[in-house]
Amino acid sequence: MRTLVVGASGAVGSSIVENLEAHGHAVTRAARRPCPGAVQVDLRHELEAFATLAGEHDVVINASGVEVPTVALHLPGATLVDISATGAYLGALRRTADTVGASVVLGAGLAPGLSTALVGELDAQDGDEIDVAIMLGSGEKHGAAAVAWTQSLAGSEVTSRPETEVVTNFRARRTLRGGDGKRRIYLRADFPDHTLLGGRYDVRSYLALSSRPVTAALALVGAAPRLSTLVSAAPAIGDDTWALAAINRRTGERRGASGRNQSAATADLTVALAERSAAVGPHGSVTAHDLASSEELLAALCARP
């Protein structure tokens, strides 16, 4: 599989490259800034040059954090696997891809990605309400793109939601039993599984961190968005565990998963979905749930070379 990794110098991108090469795939590294061993690609300004490069590959993985929906118009024969967690962007990417029949995997990683598969496997009926509990390790040092994304949520509107009224990130709270079996207070957060899967039922996503004091600090940032710079300044307190759970409020049915090292897990899942996408062939815009079961994705986490 010939793979172009955009954002190859980042925390997740470098892990994706390592994983792909360990699986024997040919990899071209691409980065926005000059970087040894990488071609320079800026998705914000150089889509024509990107299209030429993409045409030489089977799969393009966007791990750059740059969210430009028109990238779907510049994929001559390649499939795009995007690890974004932004619902508004993924929705726009889907609509753009569908206008030209481009093959795109919408959300590849823990949430969305594995969380999408867990939600999709629930025996939900029309009108059911699904809670997605996302717990991430506060002790893991995340890349700049992930920190900036989390910081941008503070005080902003949840766009991927079933409600008609405005919902603000990090303000509503719900106590849930996570994928690791532990009960925590979770904060409403703008993860995109409602956008990806919420046609028949309502999906609400909630975020907690492995350190309860850090989760409380995130709630403070939600109440006072001017403090959002604390997200990037905060030390890595806690551990690197993660846990996901999808819960049907009506029936109590739940599906969950847990592990360690979010960045490595995201890389493993992204590569697994890229391989599955390449094996399937042209498929239009799909989610992780369309390509693999949660069991298959969890097996990929256990099979790191």
Image: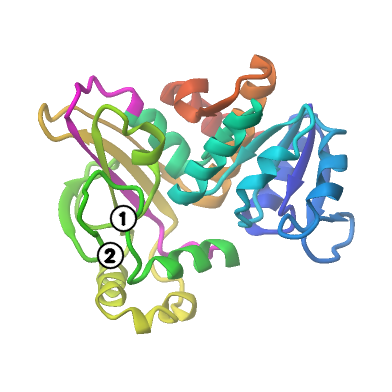
Sequence order check, earlier mark of 1 and 2: 2
- Vertical arrangement, residue 94 with respect to residue 154, above or below: above
Main secondary structure type of the part rendered in magenta: loop
Identify which amino acid the numbered label 2 is placed on.
Answer: Phe
Say whether residue 29 is left or right of residue 283.
right
Residue shown at the point (66%, 46%) measured from the top left: 70
Q: Distance between the residues labelled 1 and 2?
A: 8 Å
**Are the residues tagged 1 and 2 within 8 Å (C-beta)?**
yes
User: Residue beneath label 1, please?
Assistant: 207
Query: Residue 220 location in percent, x, y?
Result: 26, 77
Classify 103 as above or below 15. above
Amino acid tagged 1 = Leu
Residue 139 is left or right of residue 134, and the answer is: right
Q: Which residue lies furthest to the top in this view?
A: 280
Q: Is mark 2 on a helix, strand or loop?
A: loop
- Residue 63 lies within the magenta run: no
Quadrant of the rendered image containing residue 154 = bottom left
The quadrant the N terminus occupies is top right
Q: Which of 169 and 166 is in front in this view?
A: 166
Position in image of residue 249 (x %, y %): 13, 35
Figure label count: 2
Up-down: is 274 above or below 9? above
Most extreme residue toward the front is: 99
